[in-house]
Amino acid sequence: MPTYRDEVVVLRTHKLGEADRIVTMLSRRHGKLRAVAKGVRRTSSRFGARLEPFMVADVQLYQGRSLDIVQQAESLGTYGAEIAADYDRYTAASAMVETADRLNEAETTPQQYLLLVGGLRALSRGEHASRAVLDSYLLRVMSLSGWAPGLHECARCAAAGPHEWFVAQLGGMVCASCAPAGSARVHPDTGAQLRALLAGEWEVVDAATPASAGAASGLVAAYAQWHLERGIRSLSHVSTLQSPRPEGIR
């Protein structure tokens, strides 16, 4: 049976037997992979620490009948320890890898892999607020997956914006004529925050008030979970970190 190599991000692991693990990974060229890492739970394992969640590695795999087998693993990005040491970073990273796991049931792209690696790297370095990194990742990975939110023109009729209503079911910001009754009316600062998160304009993102940042986070979570068609379980832990009450929705 053939072997192959790829760069991967470890999304999650499950115990198998007394010493093995099943490792779920997002790879750069082969999409989502599930493989057995034999003996990885033994203290003498050569690459146990390299196959923990949030780690980036260059792996060699043996193609098996049902599950592939990890033969080698070399670290490319050791982000796990820095992320796990901080609760905010850990919960944000958990939501990111859970989203990547959900989105990549089918075909993936190298851009999705690189976006996740960049997000985990930013979290490990503490370059920006953890929730902002998560929000930016969610908006951008949804865009790469074909669900780009409409944040300038009306997502329904394409009328020129900016607009004041956000409806996840309709694809983002909508005009007054298209907004159903009970739609969330968004403060201009929150709309600007959403656009900055999607574009990666970190000077704008980092300067946001707690109110607009918190309100944007709520809209991002609603949008991502609507298109994934089920909740992101890790987000329930992240959402408890919003200390100031969001006031960006009016």
Image (spheres, grey):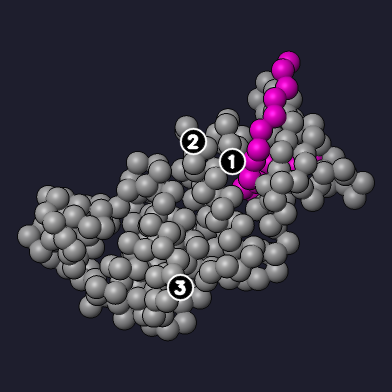
Residue reaching furthest to the bottom: 244
As for residue 12 lying within the magenta part, the answer is yes
What residue type is disc 3 on?
A: Asp
The quadrant of the picture occupied by the N terminus is top right
Residue in view at x 43 percent, y 55 percent: 138
Q: Indicate the secondary structure of the residue bearing disc 3.
A: helix
Q: Which residue is mark 3?
A: 206
Q: Earlier in the sequence, mark 3 or mark 2?
A: 2
Q: Is residue 38 left or right of residue 228?
A: right
Query: Magenta-highlighted stretch: main secondary structure?
Result: strand
Q: Which residue is mark 1?
A: 26
**Residue 66 x/y as whole percent:** 66, 25
Residue reaching furthest to the top: 1
Q: Indicate the secondary structure of the residue bearing disc 1.
A: strand
Q: Indicate the secondary structure of the residue bearing disc 2.
A: loop
**Residue 89 x/y as whole percent:** 60, 66
Q: Is residue 160 left or right of residue 198?
A: left
**In the rendered image, the vertical position of residue 108 relative to residue 14, given as above or below:** above
Residue in view at x 20 percent, y 71 percent: 185
Look at the numbered discs 1 and 3 and tell me whether their residues touch, using CB distance below 8 Å. no
As for residue 166 lying within the magenta part, the answer is no
Q: Earlier in the sequence, mark 2 or mark 1?
A: 1
Taking the image as drawn, is residue 97 in sight? no
Q: Is residue 97 left or right of residue 14?
A: left
Q: Which residue is mark 2?
A: 108
